[in-house]
Amino acid sequence: MLKKISTDKAPAAIGPYSQGIIAGNMLFASGQIPINPATGNVEAEGIQAQAEQSIINAGEILKAAGATYDNVVKTTCFLADMGDFAAFNEVYAKYFTEKPARSCVAVKDLPKGVLCEVEVIAYLG
């Protein structure tokens, strides 16, 4: 049985998808971009501020599922510019202290022209 996760403390889905789905004892969260959930706008400027907001948004989905950053087993990170890799990592390392498995790739474009997107998979068991 699948359970949809939804919280108003993370941005609402901007398409035909859920913020997160629990399948068994695993949470699969949709990628989070740096939208301020209170306003629905991208307000953060620069890669570090945008990474921070994206990761906080992912954290709110984790929280809604009864998890924390420590439950994350895999992240997928998308950067608009691989030149931002080091600055992104500085922010990322503050939150994902258990060092989950990760993929980090540069992509041509991201929704709303943002600089990064962060997706998490977490173990809830």
Image: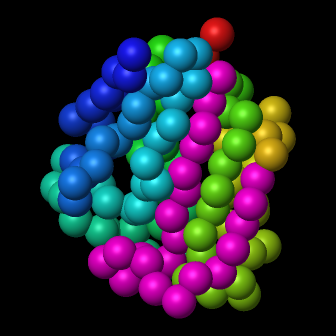
Question: What scheme was used to colour the molecule?
Answer: rainbow
In the rendering, at what x and y percent does residue 30 appear? 43, 48
Q: Is residue 9 above or below residue 105?
A: above
> Where the C terminus falls, by quadrant?
top right
Residue at 39% over, 68% down: 44
Q: Is residue 17 above or below residue 59?
A: below
Quarter of the image where one finds residue 64: top left
Residue at 27% over, 31% down: 7
Q: Is residue 101 above or below residue 104?
A: above
Residue numbers of the magenta segment: 102-123
In the rendering, at what x and y percent does residue 53 appear? 45, 55
Using residue 19 as the reference point, say whether residue 32 is left or right of it: right
Using residue 100 as the reference point, say whether residue 25 is left or right of it: left
Using residue 42 as the reference point, say whether residue 94 is left or right of it: right
Residue at 65% over, 23% down: 123
> Where the N terminus falls, by quadrant?
top left
Identify which residue, 2 or 84, lies in the foreground: 2
- Whether residue 84 is visible, yes or no, is no
In the rendering, at what x and y percent does residue 51 appear? 55, 62
Quarter of the image where one finds residue 67: top right
